[in-house]
Amino acid sequence: MTTNAEAFDRARSVIPGGVSSPVRAFGSVGGTPVFIARAEGARLVDVAGREYLDLVGSWGPAILGHGHPEVVARVQEAASRGLSFGAPTLAEAELAELVRARVPLAGKVRFVSTGTEACMTAVRLARGATGRDLVVKFAGCYHGHSDALLAAAGSGVLTAGLPGSAGVPAAATAQTLVVPYNDTDALRTVFAERGHEIAAVITEPAAANMGVVPPEPGFNELLRALTTAAGALLVYDEVLTGFRVSDAGWWGLEGHTVEPDLFTFGKVVGGGMPLAAIGGRADLLDLLAPLGPVYQAGTLSGNPLATAAGIATLTLADTEVYARVDAAASTLADALTAALTAAGVAHRLQRAGSLFSVFWGVEEPVRDYASAQRQDTAAYRAFFHAMLDAGIALPPSAYEAWFVSAAHDDEVVGRIVEAFPAAAAAAVSSS
């Protein structure tokens, strides 16, 4: 058996930073990353054999809990027939049908391997459909690491304090207009001045990559009205919220009041395997090759193991699962804010369905990227390590959503709640 420190040293000798995705390096919270050996339900076990209760959930896809037996069995069955064919399978059609049944606006669906690919394809498709170049995104929203969308992004980029990335040419982001989230005046101004040049607005319909920042009432409706009037497309990036905050994602949670042209899905749709999707109006999706002039391809797209995991996950994620996830999230969110309040920790807890996060050192509503950045990340660092010492794994960044699963039963939730007061006291001592 090895220690996490030994595992980290070994990884750093052959992998940049010792990790394959930056936030895993614990850069914003400090300390040694936890190297996971296995997971089951709501529990993780590290390489040293220590158990943790998990509030990361592989950043969202583990809605049923880790290693659900039926999902694993479906993947094992698929693996027994071969790992990859580079050819179509009926499983792709079956999963696409499940997506469309939940989100009827997704008249057709194209599978890719990552959320980055899905969002990149959505932008390319929007430009191909409209013949325009400009794309509007919102500061603090993260749509993957493709060059054009890595401008004022959230998630790991926000954690690192970078407005974009080295290696991204100025020309790559010159056609991206960045607007503050929830700022209706700025949005109206952009469309008044450049609307005839805008191909699409891409948005997290409920932002969760700068911490959880829900849309203000009427904001998404305004997006739809402005894009429709300008002849531009509206893209809902539901990589995080899709099939997690409800059976139809945020679009379902907001009551189908907005009709986006395109969706991107990831995380839950692949059940923890590398799979993502773009869905939307059939006439738009038919512009993709081989039917249309917009090229997109991928050898592992629609991989049979990933589609098997996705089919099993969407089939099992029923009304009871969503009710359990919502109940666990509510209990934890209420207990967390009670513990922080009792300890005198200034904070703002915000929710979007079952997703929630805390902004530290602020009490007024956080409505955009600028206000999210005003939080006290040192307080979270102390809270994070106190929880980790108590055997609770939180997202290693103050700018990430917390995730629960149907495996977070009363015993698991109770143990997490019991750890909150001591961790809140640690946050106080960091000030």
Image: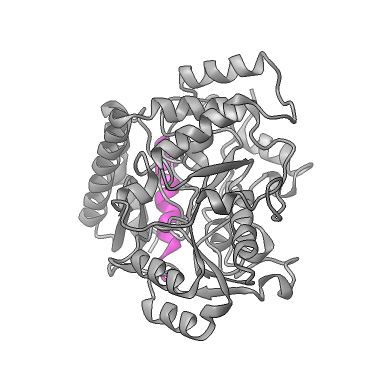
Spot occupied by residue 296 in the image (x, y as percentages of width and height) = 70, 49
Q: Does residue 53 appear to the left or right of 72 in the view shown? A: left
Spot occupied by residue 283 in the image (x, y as percentages of width and height) = 55, 52
Q: With respect to residue 262, does 407 lie above or below?
A: above
Name the residue: 44% across, 69% down.
Answer: 228
Residue 281, magenta (yes or no): no
Q: With respect to residue 1, does 214 lie above or below?
A: below
Question: Looking at this view, is 48 or 400 the one in front?
Answer: 400
Can you say which quadrant of the picture contains the C terminus? bottom left
Q: Count every numbered label the image shows and give the total.
A: 0
Residue 383, magenta (yes or no): yes
Can you say which quadrant of the picture contains the N terminus? top right
Give the magenta range: 374-392
Rendering quarter of residue 259: bottom left
Q: Main secondary structure of the magenta part?
A: helix
Name the residue: 60% across, 16% down.
Answer: 76
Question: Looking at this view, is 376 or 202 the one in front?
Answer: 202
Residue 287 visible to the viewer: yes
Q: With respect to residue 22, does 43 lie above or below?
A: above
Question: Looking at this view, is 231 or 427 the one in front?
Answer: 231
Q: Does residue 82 appear to the left or right of 270 in the view shown? A: right
Rendering quarter of residue 81: top right
Name the residue: 67% across, 44% down.
Answer: 20
Question: Looking at this view, is 255 or 61 the one in front?
Answer: 255
Q: Does residue 1 appear to the left or right of 221 in the view shown? A: right
Name the residue: 66% across, 58% down.
Answer: 146
